[in-house]
Amino acid sequence: MLEPPLHCMPEEGLPSPLSSPGISGRPVQKKGCVAPAFLLGIATLNNGDHSQTILQAIRQNMATIVTDISSNTLFTVLFLLPLIYLIAKQFKALYSSRFAPLPPGPYSWPILGNALQIGNSPHITLANLAKTYGPLFSLRLGSQLVIVAASQEAATEILKTQDRFLSGRFVPDVIPAKWLKLENLSLGWIGEVNNEFKFLRTVCQSKLFSNKALLSQSCLREKKAADTVRFIRTMEGKVLKIKEVAFAAVFSMLTNILISSDLISMEQESVEGEMTEIIRNIFEVGAAPNISDLFPILAPFDLQNLRKKSKELYLRFSTMFEAIIEERRERKMSSDNASSKEDFLETLISNGSSNEHINVLLLELLVAGSDTSTSAIEWAMAELLRNPQCMNKAQAELATEINQDLIQESDLPRLKFLHACLKESMRLHPPGPLLLPHLSLIVTFNLQNLQKKSKELYMKRRATFVAILKEWRERKVSDDNASRQEDFLDTVISNDSTDENITLLLQLLRAGTDASKSAIEWS
């Protein structure tokens, strides 16, 4: 009769009692346990078939166990190595930043840093953090250390005083220029200033943004404005999306300036909105939080499939230009070269740029120019509808100053209140609340005018953001979110200059193009 389960006596399972010297079974008061004396007894049994079978089975099982343990250990080590590397790198960065002369900032958690504090509206979050930590503060987004500038003085220090050292860009993983290895040939995402970038900036300045170029484009802008008004009149009594109409007008104007061709029609775009959808998706993919940017070591895996989506959108976008580029190349090689237009595309082809390089540049210019101008127009219309008094005042100004049916560009200097409405709308709703992130090499900031204590900041390979939402709303009024068109009535309206703060925050200086004048004209 066996003992109860909690009283383990393995000797009773043998055919005869163990008689070997030094072997004694001792019950173990735990269920499922094997007495050590029993295992020792098997090892000291006389040689026999039964004993050899048991010993052979034990050896095989032990070998299997050792093999399984080795495989599991190897898998565990391979799995933990990247994690240990990330943790060690994070702690090293935290240790070094603790003793580095960095700007103040909120406490950053290990590994994630301040990524969870940013939220869905990073420009508003950064503006609120600036109220607590000052005009220049630091954040840690994953493994990236970020310096945020949120005042006119800090923006001037970054965009003017230190622009030579801060001219590079932090290129996100989803940007086509990065995975096409063209970041050093880009306009908006230039890795460092080189001769190719200087050439592109000169071309943009002469062909797009100079006073001479703006005057030569005035007829085209007036024609597109007239076509837009004419189309809106044909839609009387129907639902019309101002955003899609404004986008079609701006996009068509830009393609005429860049490649001397219309790619979309206003009627088709207002109904289908295919190009509007592509541009909007490009912005959404580019603005989405990407773990590959927070932790570059994970970039090859593309865990969120954002790079894959970006490639699909880029392919859809560039397909429209391939035939035009090839046709222009053939025309340049033929006898029709003398009759071809010397536009932006022609200049790039003459410089020997590849099709991929041209597509990337056109993508950057068209996406940046069309979406920002469309957003400015849409918000200006929305603010006028929200403020009937301002709408009535703007309509009265138009009735008084304009005699003909359509507004000409020569009439704009007399429309001071309408111009003030546009600037106030851009103050409340800046098309780009965060400028493109700069990447510093070695920079020393003298913040004597920015902080109470004089302090020098040494930054090495760190991303720097300029938050313009707080700067544009930093006015001494009772409510920063209120509409105050009167604040801009004293500003001068001309092609040569705009409001001082807006000019500073629109320009991209060495690492961009001076498009502020074109932005005002196109809007």
Image: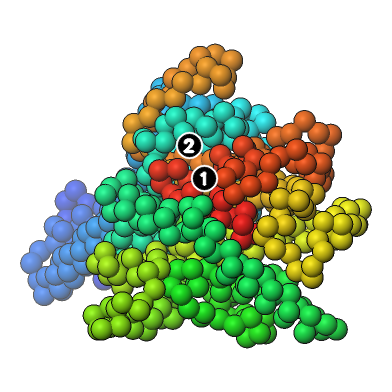
The CA distance from mark 1 to mark 2 is 9 Å
Q: Nearer the viewer, residue 414 or 247?
A: 414
488 or 144, which is in the foreground?
488
- Rendering coords of residue 308 (x, y %): 41, 71
Query: Can you tell which quarter of the image residue 76 is in?
Result: bottom left
Q: Identify the residue shown where x is 15% and y is 73%.
A: 53
Disc 1: which residue: 507
Residue 407, position as x, y percentages in the image: 74, 64
Of all residues, the one furthest to the left in this rendering is 47
Q: Nearer the viewer, residue 99 or 439?
A: 439
Q: Give the residue type that dot 2 points to.
A: Leu
In which quadrant will I find the N terminus? bottom left
- Circle 2 packing at 10 Å, graded few (<14), some (14-19), many (20+), is many
Mark yes or no: residue 455 visible: yes
Mark 1 or mark 2: whose residue is earlier in sequence: 2
Residue 90 horizontal side relative to residue 217, left or right:
left
Where is residue 500 drawn, in percent x and y? 62, 37
Residue 184 visible? The answer is: no
User: Which residue is labeled 2 in the image?
Assistant: 159
Mark 1 vs 2: CB contact within 8 A: yes
Q: Residue furthest front?
A: 403
Three-letter code for the amino acid on which mark 1 is drawn = Gln
* Residue under the point 79% across and 67% down: 404
Mark 1 element type: loop
Is the residue 194 above or below the residue 267 in the image?
above
Up the image or down, 79 lies above or below 494; here it is below
